[in-house]
Image (cartoon, rainbow, N blue to C red):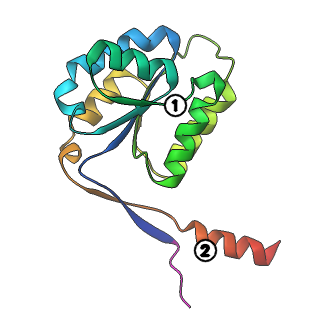
Amino acid sequence: MLIEDFVTLTIRKQKNIALIAHDSKKKALIEWCLQNKDILKEHFLCGTGTTARMITDQTSLPVKGYNSGPLGGDQQIGAKIVEGSVDFVIFFSDPLEAQPHDPDVKALLRIAQVYDIPIANNRATADFMITSTFMNEEYNHKVINFRQNIEQRATTL
């Protein structure tokens, strides 16, 4: 049986977008969401606890909330990426302030890279992503065929 090294995944026209922000960046993310409300309302939104709640309260956008970042919310978003139910991440992070849950943040960024998920860490990148022509269409991308990878590792270990 021939198994390909990569598989093609499709990000549908209606995106599943995760919205995350460190405390010092929550206001900026909410402002960004207000500025892009007409685009965001066409997609499914989720986010970490406090951020999701604040965005919903201040923009009226429906945002499914998970735990706050320090309580596992970043890990929950990462798990949703692995499951295929998050395909776009906007994460306004604060590079100048140490975060107590920094390992969780790094794990989220890593899993987004592994699964070839678009991720914006600042307003400029988020602006470029949200105005891309890919926002209005399906997007096919290739990721490592993890089933093959697991099978090969199991036979070589």
Q: Position of residue 126 (x, y in %)?
A: 32, 29
Name the kind of residue labelled 1 in the image.
Answer: Tyr
Residue identified by numbered label 1: 66
Q: Position of residue 33 (x, y in %)?
A: 28, 21
Give how far apart the Cα atoms at labels 2 and 1 are: 32 Å
The vertical placement of 105 against 21, above or below, is below
Residue 99 horizontal side relative to residue 141, left or right:
right
Q: Is residue 16 visible?
A: yes
| 2 or 1: tag closer to the N-terminus | 1
The vertical placement of 98 against 107, above or below, is above
Q: Residue at x 46, y 54 (%)?
A: 84
Q: Is residue 29 visible?
A: no
The tag on residue 148 is 2
Residue 37 location, quadrant: top left
Crowdedness near tag 2: few (<14), some (14–19) or many (≥20) residues, C-alpha within 10 Å: some
Disc 2 secondary structure class:
helix
Residue 36 horizontal side relative to residue 1, left or right:
left
Asked if labels 1 and 2 touch by Cβ distance under 8 angstroms, the answer is no
Query: What is the quadrant of the N terminus in the image?
Result: bottom right
Residue 64 horizontal side relative to residue 104, left or right:
left
Which of the two residues, 128 or 64, is positioned nearer the viewer here? 64
Which of the two residues, 148 or 72, is positioned nearer the viewer here? 72
Residue 19 location, quadrant: top left
Which span is picked out in magenta?
1-5
